[in-house]
Amino acid sequence: MRLTGFFIFAASVALLPVLFPNNYFVTVVGIAAGLHVILAVGLNLLMGYAGQISLGHAAFFGMGAYASAILTTRFDWPGLLAMLAGLLVAGTIAWLLARPILRLRGHYLAMATLGFGIIIHVIMVQATHWTGGPDGLGEIPPLNLLGWTVDDDQQWYGVIAAAMLLSIWLSLNMIDSRIGRALRAVRGSEFAAQMMGIDATRAKTQIFVVSALFAAFAGSLFAHQQAFVSPDSFSLIISVELVTMVVLGGMASTFGAACGAIALTLLYEGLMVFEDYEMLIHGALLMAVMIFLPQGLFVGLSQGIRRGWTLIASRQDVQDARKAIQS
Amino acid sequence: MTKATPLLAIEALEQSFGGVMALAGVSFQTHENLIHAVIGPNGAGKTTLFNVLCGFYQPTAGSLRFNSQELRGLPPHRIAALGIARTFQNLQLFFNMTVLENVMVGCHLRARVGLLAAALRLPKVRREERQLREWSSEALELCELADHAEQPAGALPYGLMKRVEIARALAAKPRLLLLDEPAAGLNDTETLALRDLIMRIRTSGVTVLLVEHHMPLVMSVSDRLLVLDYGSVLAEGTPAEIQANPQVIAAYLGGAVQYAV
C-alpha cells in the first residue's frame, strides 16, 4: 500500500494524547514538533527532491505568522482569511523570487536565500509601525475555525496534528506523481529531464512556491497558537535549524524530514536540563549522527533495519535448506 | 528516395565555440522511417550536432527544420514536445529513481496532471498513473527490461542502463529518436541485441538518427550514412556507397573492409 506508513504515523499521532492525556511532552512539545514537521516537510520538497537549498526559509514562516498577527490584531480579520492572505503573500514573494534566485546553484543559491532571510528579518525588526519591532506583536486572538475556537493545548494539539498530517499527505502525493517525478528527474539529471520535455525552471519555481506555502501555513498556526510573534522566532538560526531537521532526518524522504523535525524538537527539550552544556551536547550529537548515519536518522535506520531483516531471512533460508538436506 | 518533405532538414548549420568551428556548414536531410547513421572521427562534430538539434546549443548560423518547423531558438523541453527524444553518450539516467520511474518520466509529455491535482490525488491522477504505467511497461517490454522495472536504475549493469535510456526515450513516443553511441561499452552479444532493438524501433514507426563508432553495427543497421569530418560533411549515402567512397576511406575507415556482424 502506498500510504501504509502514513496511516501508521497518523494512528500514533492520534493515540498519543489518549495514552498520555495532559502530558507536557505531548501537548506542548508535540505542538512545537508538529509545526516543525510542516516546515521540514515543505523544505524537504525543495532540498531533498528538487536539490535546491534554502537558508532563508524562516522568512516565509515569518510572513505567514506576521500576516496573521497584523491582520487579526490591527484589522480584525477573521483568522482563516488572514491565513489565506499570508499564504498569498508568501506564495507571491516566493514566485517573484524564484526566477532570479533559482538560476543560481550551490553556494550562490545558499548565499542568495541567506540574504533574503536576513532582509525579511531586518524588516520585521525595523518596520516597527507594522510589526511592533523587536518587542513583537501580542494579543493575537485564538484561531476560529468556522465557529469553533481553538483555545487550549489539547485542542491545539488536534489542530496542529491535523495540519501536519495534511502536509505530509500532500507531500507524499506530490512526490509520487508526474510532478514529483519531474522534480526528481531534474535533480537526477537536468540535461536529460529537459530532453523528456520537462521545463526545469518551471518545476523548480513551482516547488519553491509550494515550499513557501507550507512554511507560511505553519507560520499562521504558530502566531495563533502562541498569541504572540516576535522577530526572534524567524531569525537566521531558525532557518539553519530547519535545514538541520531535513538533513538529520534524511533528505528526499517525507517521513525522514518529519522524523528529523520531531527528533530535533525533542532534543532541544531534552537538553534543556543541561543548561550551559546544551549547545555543546547538541552539536556533538548532530556530528555523531552525520558521521555514523550520513543518510540521516530515518533513511539510515530504516535501511539498516531492512538489511538486518534480509540477513535474518537469508539465515532462516539456509537453516531450512540444511534441514531439508538432512531429512 | 521518397519525394515527401523530409522529417529533418538541416541547412548550412554552423556552431562555433570561440574560435573553434565544431560544425562548419552542415547540410543534410533525413526522411521518415529511416535509420540514418552519423559517423566520423572523434571531434568531428557528431555529438555537437545532436546537442544543437536538441536545443542545448544555439547554432551560430544555419537552420534546422523538423517536420517543416524551425527548431532554432527553441529551448530543449519545447523541442522534445515536438517529438524528438534522445539518449546520451555519457549516461544521464535518473539514478535517484527506479527503472520504471525513469521510463515514466519519459512519458512526461503524454500526461497532463498538474501540481494541484497531484497534491490532492484526484481520481484523474490515479487513472493517469495507471495509463503511464501501462505505456512505460510497453517501452520496457520492447527493450526487454520488464524484469528490472522495480530496481533502482543505478543498480543495473552498464549494458542494461544504456537500454533504460532507450526505453525512457521511447516512452515519449517520439517521431525522431537520437541515439548517441548506444553500443559504446557493450559486449558483442549486447551489441547484437542492440541491433535488433534498433530494427524493432524503426518497425514501430520511429525514425532513428544514430551516432556510433561500432562500424559493423552501423553498416548493418543503417539505411543511410552521414560522414562528418572536422565539422563538415565528408559524404552522405547508403552504406555501400560510403564504404566505396575513397575520401571516407582515407579520412576514417582506413582501407576497404567488408563489414558484417
Image (tube, coloured by chain):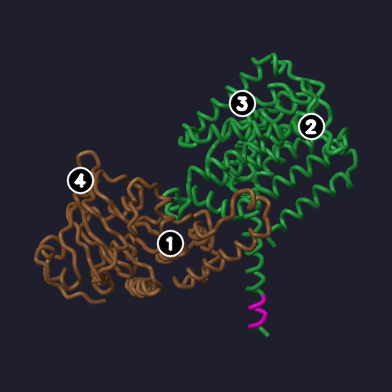
Look at chain B in the picture and name its colour. Answer: brown
Q: For residue A236, which numbered disc appears in the image?
A: 3
Q: Chain of mark 1?
A: B
At horizontal 66% and vertical 62% (from top left) the residue drawn is A309
Label 2 crowd bin: few (<14), some (14–19), many (20+), radius 10 Å: many
**Region in magenta:** A320-325
The reply to whether dot 4 and dot 3 touch (C-beta < 8 Å) is no
At horizontal 28% and vertical 66% (from top left) the residue drawn is B36
Q: CA distance from mark 1 to mark 3?
A: 44 Å
Amino acid type for the residue under numbered disc 4: Met
User: Residue B133, located in which quarter of the rendered image?
Assistant: bottom right
Quadrant occupied by the N terminus of chain B: bottom left
Q: Nearer the viewer, residue A172 or B131?
A: B131
The residue that mark 2 highlights is A79
The residue that mark 1 highlights is B169
Q: Nearer the viewer, residue A210 or A155?
A: A210
